[in-house]
């Protein structure tokens, strides 16, 4: 194969892979939403997939395509190295200046590739009533609605208790039906568990031990308590809705 033909094929593949990387970036940003974005736009946290792959799996594809593009770029530089050197010499006349520019540039490129392996992310504890933007407002509204329901239920029970004192058999069936409906409402209410939360936060908030949660999810080894809830999806393929169901079943079988 002629060198010119090979260069054309490499450049065409570079453009194709670059287009795929940009498209997957848009897919992750605007289509396969994060847990917080799904609560804001959909009012729930359903599982989302495209071509049978979820958000985390498309992130892996995005990384693989980035590595493929890096390999193609290296080939491109290899076959054009003589031309690149001539252009660089024409652009920067002095030899020492060329060295002073080239060495920091190459070190900067190497740093941008390898720095994720040497940094430690900062973990921020979620505060009561905290959140970001509209999501915080949504949580506040749900908490307010929950308190209003509790107050209404307390007033309803008090009214029925006073009626029952006057007439022992009055409205007994109505109170029992209200209790049953309230229990069903609690059973199907979303717990608002997000992948950005830590495992310890979720277990503490819902009074369930880490051992009990892992057991109900069919996990033999314990996950790190300070790890994010997204670890269940990444390592075990367990969605947040499945985690919510396990905790709801635990709370229904172990009422306070």
Image (cartoon, helix red, strand yellow):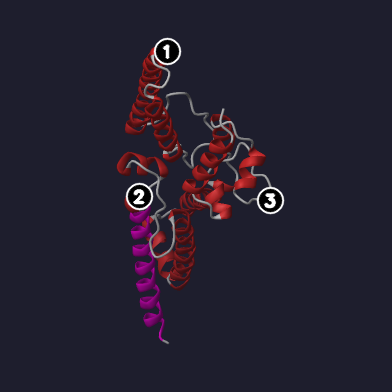
Q: Residue at x 60, y 44 (%)?
A: 118
Instruction: From the image, tell me which residue sits under label 2.
Output: 29
Instruction: From the image, tell me which residue sits under label 1.
Output: 165
Residue 121 seen in the current view: no
The first of marks 3 and 1 along the sequence is 1
Instruction: From the image, tell me which residue sits under label 3.
Output: 220
Q: Give the magenta part as a residue range.
A: 2-29
Residue 24 falls within the magenta-colored stretch: yes
**x%, y% of residue 213?**
61, 42
User: Is 142 in front, or is 169?
Assistant: 169
In this rendering, which labeled residue sits more in front, label 1 or label 2? 1
In this rendering, which labeled residue sits more in front, label 3 or label 2? 3
- Mark 1 lies on a secondary structure that is helix
Q: Quadrant of the C terminus?
A: top right
Q: Residue at x 32, y 44 (%)?
A: 42
Q: Is residue 68 above or below residue 96?
A: below
Q: CA distance from mark 3 to mark 1?
A: 53 Å
Quadrant assignment, res 251: top right
- Mark 3 lies on a secondary structure that is loop
The first of marks 1 and 2 along the sequence is 2
Q: Residue at x 50, y 45 (%)?
A: 245
| Residue 66 horizontal side relative to residue 115, left or right | left
| Residue 137 horizontal side relative to residue 125, left or right | left
**What secondary structure predominates along the stretch shown in magenta?**
helix
Q: Residue at x 49, y 52 (%)?
A: 109
Q: Residues within 10 Å of mark 1 (few under 14, many from 20)?
A: few
**x%, y% of residue 187?**
45, 38
Q: Is residue 10 above or below residue 132?
A: below
């Amino acid at each position: 194969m002629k060198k010119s033909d090979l260069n054309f094929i490499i450049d065409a593949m570079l453009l194709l892979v670059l287009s795929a990387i940009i498209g997957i970036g848009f897919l992750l940003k605007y289509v396969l939403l994060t847990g917080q974005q799904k609560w804001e736009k959909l009012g729930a946290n359903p599982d989302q997939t495209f071509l049978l792959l979820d958000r985390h799996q498309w992130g892996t594809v995005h990384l693989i395509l980035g590595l493929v593009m890096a390999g193609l770029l290296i080939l491109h530089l290899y076959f054009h190295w003589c031309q690149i050197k001539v252009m660089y010499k024409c652009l920067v006349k002095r030899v020492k200046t060329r060295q002073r520019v080239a060495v920091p540039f190459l070190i900067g490129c190497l740093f941008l590739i390898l720095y994720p392996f040497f940094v430690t992310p900062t973990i921020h504890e979620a505060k009561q009533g905290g959140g970001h933007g509209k999501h915080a407002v949504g949580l506040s509204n749900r908490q307010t609605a929950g308190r209003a329901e509790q107050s209404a239920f307390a007033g309803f029970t008090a009214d029925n208790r006073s009626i029952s004192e006057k007439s022992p058999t009055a409205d007994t069936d109505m109170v029992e039906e209200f209790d049953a409906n309230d229990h069903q409402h609690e059973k199907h209410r979303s717990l608002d568990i997000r992948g950005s939360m830590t495992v310890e936060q979720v277990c503490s908030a819902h009074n369930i031990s880490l051992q009990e949660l892992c057991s109900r999810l069919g996990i033999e080894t314990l996950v790190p308590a300070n790890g994010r809830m997204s670890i269940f999806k990444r390592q075990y393929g367990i969605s947040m809705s499945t985690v919510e169901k396990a905790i709801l079943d635990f709370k229904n079988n172990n009422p306070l």
